[in-house]
Amino acid sequence: MFSLQNKKAVVTGGGSGIGRAIATLFAKQGAEVHILDLTLESAKEAVEDIKKLGGTVFSYACNVASQKEVVATFESIGNIDILINNAGIANVGKVDTTSESDFDRVMEVNVKGVYNCLYAAIPQFRISSGGVIINMASIAAWVGIPDRFAYSTAKGAVMAMTLSVAKDYMNENIRCNSISPARVHTPFVDGFISKNYAGKEAEMFEKLSKSQPIGRMGKPEEIAALALYLCSDEAGFITGCDYPIDGGFIKLNN
Ligand SMILES: NC(=O)c1ccc[n+]([C@@H]2O[C@H](COP(=O)([O-])OP(=O)(O)OC[C@H]3O[C@@H](n4cnc5c(N)ncnc54)[C@H](O)[C@@H]3O)[C@@H](O)[C@H]2O)c1
């Protein structure tokens, strides 16, 4: 079960955190993995680790916000079977404390970046006669996380894009689902704690851990395991769904 032998998978933001865990697990399961990240340097450690495990992996410096770069990269990869739209950035702020430039930056990466990769991937899926897409959304799209206006807005768009694409390409044998994690312990979380809560890192880490009723943050490997299931042939009946993986955050927090 859950073999990805003979599958070609693209993982955006595969150099770090959740994307890196997905790239590693998919390579272990036999996929040929193509990591897109901002620089070759940011994908380097992930690539080395996967090669050590005997996996097949390639990396590309590609800013998902640039349609030109994204299209050229997908054309060079060629036919694909799996797309993991995972690259994303964080932003803290309420509507009146989010600057226009911060709003635009989050939309450029977290919304337009997903659109660009979908746009570039569809012709490559057609060559493979179908495929499967996972878009990385967030519990921020489900509930109003305090102080995350632009980020929540972007993740809401990711969930809507998932439905739109699932409908439009169902008859081309392309499945499209999204995953909505609560807090997962990755460099993304460590980065925004140190940037926004300097001097109170340990206290904030504890608070963020406790915001999941289960009492801890998720692990990147736990998200990767769900992504593997959803991309496997065993999940062939699943499309147009969002999967929260949240330690009880959405339904048990009261
Ligand atoms: N960590 C969490 O708590 C959490 C929770 C819910 C959803 N998510 C989502 O999961 C995804 C991955 O998060 P993570 O925590 O692993 O983040 P991370 O910061 O650890 O990794 C993100 C990767 O994306 C790359 N990246 C950023 N901008 C890019 C761009 N413009 N083009 C190409 N690559 C780019 C980064 O270089 C990095 O390698 C994001 O979409 C995030 O919103 C994360």
Image: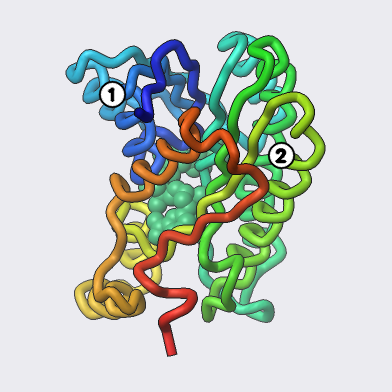
Where residue 126 appears, as percent x and y from the top left, is 72, 16
Point 28% across, 54% down: residue: 219
Q: Which residue is mark 1?
A: 28
Q: How many marks?
A: 2
User: Does residue 82 lie above or below 161 as drawn?
Assistant: above
Closer to the camera, 228 or 69? 228
Point 52% across, 60% down: residue: 138
Q: Say if disc 2 is inside 8 Å of ligand 1.
A: no
Residue type, numbered disc 1: Lys
Q: Are marks 2 and 1 in contact (CB under 8 Å)?
A: no
Q: Which mark is residue 115?
A: 2
User: Does residue 242 lie above or below 12 as drawn?
Assistant: below
User: Does residue 5 lie above or below 135 as drawn?
Assistant: above
Determine the image quadrant of residue 156. Answer: bottom right
Where residue 127 appears, as percent x and y from the top left, is 69, 10
Answer left or right for 193 relative to 107: left
Question: Which-is-in-front pick, marks 2 and 1?
Answer: 1
Answer left or right for 158 relative to 19: right
Residue 37 showing in the rendered view: no
User: N-terminal of the two: label 2 or label 1?
Assistant: 1
Residue type, numbered disc 2: Tyr
Where residue 42 appears, as percent x and y from the top left, is 37, 32
| Mark 1 element type | helix
Q: Residues within 10 Å of mark 2 (few under 14, many from 20)?
A: some
Q: Residues within 10 Å of mark 1 (few under 14, many from 20)?
A: some
| Mark 2 element type | helix
Answer left or right for 195 relative to 234: left
